[in-house]
Image (tube, rainbow, N blue to C red):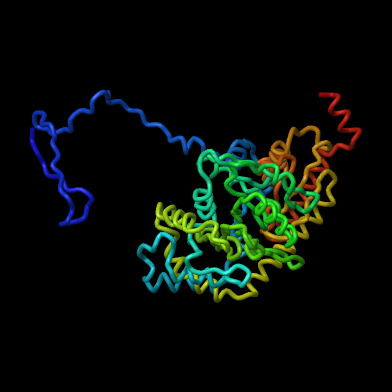
């Protein structure tokens, strides 16, 4: 048997050396055979990968339908404000990144939680007397999606449960189930502008509830909670001692007739992890810059949650350093008129879309107050040839080449979601086609009954 010295840990001249014995077989050297193991290929996907399920992809990818070749496709399904080219980011935002790129000062690794100066910039931007923030209260992430993932991972263990809105952003469930965390869905009420059904919410809390996810302004609803409703949500969380994960990526993207209230500014004792980022308000979702803001006025999270977030952030080396380097300038120098102009376009589009769809028999849109979306109820009894919202939207594609996302994707059947970021003429054309489609298939009460009898 031969003896060899092998260097481990890769630390240069000071690395420890180990004496490893290998069996010599002929002209080759091989490790000694492990006892009781017969070598064989057994490569399997991990349990985490098997538990990862995206309901949007699962539904959309199985919609095997071709659009009408006589009509150009209009997709109202993707929540990306850059798709149509009518909502570019501000020149100041672009210049900030160009300057960092040209300087060459941000080409290396940053700390996993982000550059200290960038964390200070985010803290300063969101700091207020009602919810004070310092740099150590900020964790920079690769987009808001990673912020949500880290927040979930630090708050919940496998076997615990989280409270998630219905309808709600599908990523919450996708992430939770992949981590072995149970999802309990609490209802939003369309007749109350998508306020939370507080009684239903509180009834779901048990000893295994790790956190409440609240999304305001909402995807997919386009709703904005009032100050009084946020205080009611905090009262439930306080009574039940449940922390809040606040998805506020659409924060401040609200129309002129209402106001966005960060929930942390209203909390006196409920600890909150607020997730946000550049994606929506600054119209750069592909830049992947997000953050977690830690609000813990009563030191309930303590060092436990803060240290946990730092450790979890070390699984990757943080968000893009070029965007980090530009972040302070983006936050300080983006002109107010940029935000105002974006919101004016979205409000105008929302009003157009709401008015047009409200005039169509069989549809009941819910007026949005912010974000980039509008939800529409399908009065399925008047469209008896369709089993559900998925069939309805499939036929809308095949006959009119208009793609709206069925709200089954958001755990809320018999609705569909419309994205309102496209140019005005495209909205009008899409609504005109939806009207033509509904008029073709709409059945009054008597017609619907006759059709049911014929089945």
The residue located at (53%, 45%) in the rendering is 175
Q: Quadrant of the C terminus?
A: top right
Indicate whether 122 appears above or below 381. below
Q: Nearer the viewer, residue 374 or 208?
A: 208
Image-based side of 193 in relation to 31, left or right? right
Q: Would residue 422 be visible to someone looking at this image?
A: no
Indicate whether 220 appears above or below 31. below
Image-based side of 119 in relation to 238, left or right? left
Image-based side of 414 in relation to 449, left or right? left
Q: Would residue 270 be visible to someone looking at this image?
A: yes
Indicate whether 70 appears above or below 2. below
Counting from the top left corner in percent of width and height, residue 304 is at 47, 55
Q: How many marks?
A: 0
Counting from the top left corner in percent of width and height, residue 127 is at 57, 71
Give the quarter of the image for residue 170. Answer: top right
Q: Quadrant of the N terminus?
A: top left
Counting from the top left corner in percent of width and height, residue 338 is at 63, 72
Give the quarter of the image for residue 82. Answer: bottom right
Q: Nearer the viewer, residue 234 or 340?
A: 234
The residue located at (68%, 60%) in the rendering is 423
Q: Nearer the viewer, residue 200 or 350?
A: 200
The residue located at (41%, 69%) in the rendering is 101
Counting from the top left corner in percent of width and height, residue 310 is at 43, 57
Residue that lies at the very extreme toward the right in this rendered image:
446
The residue located at (66%, 57%) in the rendering is 216
Q: Nearer the viewer, residue 74 or 194?
A: 194
Give the quarter of the image for residue 60. Answer: top right
């Amino acid at each position: 048997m031969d003896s060899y010295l092998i260097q481990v840990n890769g630390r240069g001249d000071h690395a420890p050396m180990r004496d490893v014995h290998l069996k010599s077989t002929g002209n080759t050297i091989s490790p000694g055979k492990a006892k009781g193991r017969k070598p064989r290929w057994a490569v399997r996907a991990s349990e985490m990968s098997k538990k990862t399920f995206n309901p949007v992809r699962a539904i959309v990818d199985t919609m095997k339908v071709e659009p009408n070749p006589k009509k150009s496709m209009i997709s109202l399904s993707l929540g990306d404000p850059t798709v149509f080219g009518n909502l570019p980011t501000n020149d100041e935002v672009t210049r900030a990144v160009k300057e960092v790129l040209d300087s060459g000062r941000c080409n290396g690794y940053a700390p996993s939680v982000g550059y200290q100066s960038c964390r200070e910039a985010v803290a300063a931007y969101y700091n207020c007397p009602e919810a004070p923030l310092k740099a150590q209260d900020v964790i920079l992430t690769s987009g808001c999606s990673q912020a949500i993932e880290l927040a979930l991972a630090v708050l919940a263990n496998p076997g615990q449960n989280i409270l998630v809105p219905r309808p709600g952003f599908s990523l919450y469930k996708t992430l939770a189930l992949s981590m072995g965390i149970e999802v309990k869905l609490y209802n939003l009420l369309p007749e109350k502008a998508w306020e939370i059904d507080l009684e239903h919410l509180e009834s779901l809390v048990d000893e295994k509830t790790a956190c409440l996810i609240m999304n305001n302004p909402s995807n997919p609803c386009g709703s904005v909670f009032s100050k009084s409703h946020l205080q009611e949500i905090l009262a439930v969380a306080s009574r039940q001692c449940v922390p809040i994960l606040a998805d506020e990526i659409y924060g401040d993207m609200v129309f002129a007739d209402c106001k966005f209230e960060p929930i942390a500014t209203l909390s006196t004792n409920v600890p909150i992890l607020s997730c946000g980022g550049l994606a929506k308000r600054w119209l750069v979702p592909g830049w992947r810059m997000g953050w977690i803001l830690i609000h813990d006025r009563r030191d309930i999270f303590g060092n436990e949650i803060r240290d946990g977030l730092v450790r979890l952030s070390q699984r990757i080396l943080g968000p893009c350093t070029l965007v980090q380097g530009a972040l302070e300038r983006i936050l300080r120098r983006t002109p107010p008129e940029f935000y105002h102009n974006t919101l004016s376009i979205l409000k105008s589009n929302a009003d157009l879309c709401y008015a047009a769809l409200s005039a169509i028999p069989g549809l009941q849109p819910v007026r949005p107050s912010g974000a980039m979306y509008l939800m529409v109820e399908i009065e399925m009894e008047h469209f008896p040839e369709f089993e559900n919202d998925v069939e309805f939207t499939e036929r809308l594609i095949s006959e009119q080449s208009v793609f709206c996302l069925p709200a089954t994707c958001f755990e809320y059947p018999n609705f569909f979601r419309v994205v309102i970021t496209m140019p005005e003429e495209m909205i009008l054309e899409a609504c005109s086609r939806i009207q033509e489609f509904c008029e073709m298939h709409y059945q009054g009460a008597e017609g619907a009954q006759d059709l049911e009898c014929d089945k």
